[in-house]
Amino acid sequence: MAVVAPKQRLMDAAAELFSSIGYAETSLRHIASNVGIKAGSVYYHFESKDEIYTDVLLAGMDLMIDGFQAVETDSNSTSMRETLAEHVVGHLKVLHANLAYTSLHVTTFRTAPAAVRRQLVPRRDEYEAMWTALLRAALPNTPVSEISILRLALFGAMNSSIDWFDAGRGSLEEFAEVITDAFWAGATERQQRVAQ
């Protein structure tokens, strides 16, 4: 069994607490207690709760970016619709496999301290740019001004699943197929109407 480094153990504990009880309610004492150390020992690895929070959010964003890039590398799709479907599945799998880290971007980013948000914006922008490029390639006749709206709508459909998805009612792949079908049908139909 692999030994988890103390800093990673602290981040894992913090991620779980931030996602379960919230940023404001989580203290360094809570985090330290969850890994069996004294609160003062946290300062050996992190200067503040904000630093831990920032690192957890950055790690969550890195997981999403790595997941997107892995789909790009492994893709065998023969159409833009298939490519989109692969990315929807990839997003959902990474999101749900790492909820303590990834869900924070959905649930707490807007209420995070301003200094934390400033550090996160470039990484979030990087991920959004990947999706924007994908959607522009998939929907070349859709006005650029609408692509960001479509991206936000697609993110909303995928990310809201953290509140209700239950593997007992179906797989992520099945859910991804439904999302992709609905999104693709609506976006391509609108593209055709706008182009006329």
Image (cartoon, rainbow, N blue to C red):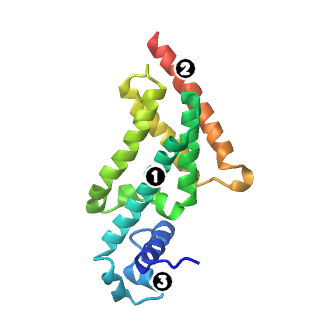
Tell which circle, 1 or 2, labels the residue nearer the N-terminal end.
Answer: 1
Count of marks, rendered view: 3
Categorize mark 1 by other alpha carbons within 10 Å: few (<14), some (14-19), many (20+).
Answer: some
Q: Which quadrant would the N terminus be assigned to in this image?
A: bottom right
Pinpoint residue 35: horizontal percent, then vertical percent.
Answer: 48, 83
Residue of label 3: 35
Residue receiving disc 1: 66
Between the C-alphas of marks 2 and 3, the distance is 53 Å
Query: Residue 82: x, y in percent?
Result: 59, 32
Find residue 185 and report its image quarter.
top right
Q: Picture quarter containing residue 18? A: bottom left
**Disc 2 marks which residue?**
189
Task: Find numbered disc 2 in the image and state the secondary structure of the residue it sits on.
Answer: helix
The residue drawn where x is 43% and y is 77% is: 10
- Mark 2 residue type: Glu
User: Relative to the observer, which residue lies in front, 182 or 83?
Assistant: 83
159 lies left or right of 129: right
Label 1 sits on a secondary structure element that is helix
Closer to the N terminus: mark 2 or mark 3? Answer: 3
